[in-house]
Image (spheres, rainbow, N blue to C red):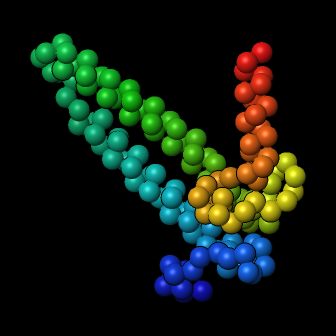
Amino acid sequence: MSASELDEYRPSADEPFMNDRQKEYFRRKLVDWKQDIIRESQGTLNNLQEANNQLPDVSDRASSETEKALELRTRDRQRKLTSKIDAALRRIETGEYGYCEETGEPISLRRLDARPVATLSLEAQERHERNEKVHRED
């Protein structure tokens, strides 16, 4: 499948679930997402290296430190997301991608398109979140 065909392609419920075309669509989506994260991370590193720690005003230094801490927390979340992307790419290779870890049923294409690293169907995710809420309230 050419790059232009993939750019125009959208998975459809009218075709067999997780056929080669769908797998390639999601693989490409995940790889592009990971590359964007890596590019953003490199920008963060450059910004942190260029940051001037010799700000004369105490409040300017405090603001600068707060911005750095926020940026580092964001990068940590993105590092974890990169791990989820890598796991999703491995699932594509093993043929497990697109199937709910809990029920084994297909995850909807709309859910996968919105959240390509999803491992649970919407129903299983909602059940998981309800159980988590109940345990938190205990």
Is residue 42 visible in the rendered image? The answer is yes
**Quadrant (top left, top right, bottom left, bottom right) of the C terminus:** top right
Given residues 87 and 22, the one toward you in this image is: 22
Percent x, y of residue 52: 19, 29
Is residue 119 visible in the rendered image? The answer is no
Residue at far left of view: 56
Q: Residue at x 80, y 62 (%)?
A: 106
Q: How many labels, in total?
A: 0
Percent x, y of residue 134: 77, 25
Q: Residue at x 78, y 22 (%)?
A: 135
In this rendering, position of residue 56 left or right of residue 119: left
Percent x, y of residue 18: 75, 72
Residue 20, above or below 83: below
In this rendering, position of residue 3 left or right of residue 15: left
Q: Residue at x 59, y 58 (%)?
A: 114
Residue at far top of view: 58
Given residues 23 and 115, the one toward you in this image is: 115
Q: Quadrant of residue 13?
A: bottom right
Residue 93, above or below 100: below
Q: Residue at x 74, y 66 (%)?
A: 93
Percent x, y of residue 25: 61, 73
**Quadrant (top left, top right, bottom left, bottom right) of the N terminus:** bottom right
